[in-house]
Image (cartoon, grey):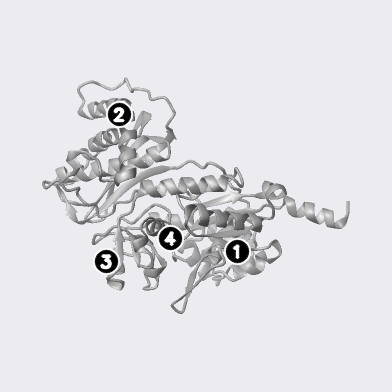
Amino acid sequence: MAESERADRSASLRPAILLVDMDSFFASVEVRDDPSLQGKPVLVGGDGNRGVVASCTYEARRFGIHSAMPMVTAKRLCPDAVVLGGNISRYAAVSKELKAILLDFSPLVEPLGLDEAFVDVTGARQLLGTPKEMATAIHGRIEEELRLSCGIGVGSSKLIAKLASRDAKPHFEDGVLIEGPGVFVVLDEDVRAYLDQFPVRALYGVGPATAKTLSRLGIDRVSELAELDPALLSRHVGHHFATTLIGLARGDDPRTVVAGVANKSIGHEETFSVDESDRGILEQRLRRQAVAVSSALRESSQRGRTVSVKIKHSNFQLQTRSHTMVSGIDDHGALFGVGSALLATLEVQEGIRLLGLSVSNLEDASTPVQLQLDMDEGDSFSDSIASAERLQLERASLDDAVDEIRARFGRHALGSASMLDGHGVVVPAQRDVPFGPKDALSERQKTKENLDRGGEKLRDDGEEEG
């Protein structure tokens, strides 16, 4: 075999991974669907005293606004900003279109939420061209078919693709927006030099605590970590973690793209402007959350077996109650029935600042529903669960019809009378965007999940909004 042929064969066997990251996903979808927002600073998130920015346009970032910023701070920086509550069903639908495009290039697509995904195109090179050519084609289709923009990083590992995607996107320099190339490729021979420019916090698994430990050892840059003796680091973080970190710093990331990673949970939570103790109001808000969560479940063709209710007291103490059922549910009435029964077991008389409803143990919606028959009769909690199961069986076709109406005329076009205030107006939520799906490997997602102000938990565009 000729030397050039061996080189080509060797190159074709090396992993080729893309990271597709949509630009300001929630905000961009809103602008796309409402041309009057074009060129305006748009914020998507909770419009209350305790709400946070989930996504914002670049026009808003010019004022120093970024995701996870308290909404009150963002509005102070930009009083003329347009604030929108968001629409999870619409974002999920666009995300499904995005995944369909990616699947045309490889069956190995691993979503990191609604707006981001790894794609392993190693096996597609013989048919579809070089990794850069495939990334360029994907970028073009997203612009043409979805009318949205994205940044695509290309590399031989997840780590490199992730970092490269940031360099593919627009960014600000001295207050001036610099357009990104759209596609950014890091060649194998350039990996070490590319990584050396980053702080250690850029590496997967390095959070504030690990960064502080490394800093005490005089390690602040990836280049310094790459040269560190593993035995020395092992004494501080353990052998396995030390080996993993130094390997990452040297460009060795063994993680593979896993297709079809299941959503771990889908949920909705709301932080109140003032502490709330009225159970009637709390149940009203819980029902709203059940509607949003059930819609997101059906949009992703899933049902959830475990229903959880979370509250946060004024002293920030968290309490959670959960119940796991034999079969999954996706009907809002069924979700509310279980959630209401769980809420009844929690003390709220002193007032709570946050209420959340989520479902986990997700299963495909085609899974047959089984009734749970082993509950004691006469128990109020058991009666609520049994009632929820009956609703799940009885209302499937009705839910489909309601989803279609809401998709056409807006999520408030049709709903229960119990979701209205005394004047027939839908009670507004401080934050009207559900969260989920989640991915344990996304460091930025972990950051959002740790927000303490009822922030958006659904993945969006980077912690630095670049």
Q: Earlier in the sequence, mark 1 or mark 2?
A: 1
Contact between labelled residues 3 and 4, with CB atoms less than 8 Å apart:
no
Q: Which residue is mark 4?
A: 24
Q: CA distance from mark 4 to mark 1?
A: 18 Å
Q: Which amino acid does the dot numbered 4 rest on?
A: Ser
Q: Which residue is mark 1?
A: 184
- Quadrant location of residue 152? bottom right
Q: Earlier in the sequence, mark 3 or mark 1?
A: 3
Contact between labelled residues 2 and 4, with CB atoms less than 8 Å apart:
no
Q: Which amino acid does the dot numbered 3 rest on?
A: Val
Q: In the rendering, which numbered label is found on residue 72?
A: 3
- Kindly identify the residue that appears in the image at 17 percent across and 39 percent down: 417
Q: In the rendering, which numbered label is found on residue 395?
A: 2
Front position in the image: 446 or 396: 396
At mark 2, the secondary structure is: loop
At mark 1, the secondary structure is: strand
At mark 3, the secondary structure is: helix
- Kindly identify the residue that appears in the image at 55 percent across and 64 percent down: 168
Front position in the image: 348 or 232: 348
Q: Nearer the viewer, mark 3 or mark 1?
A: 1
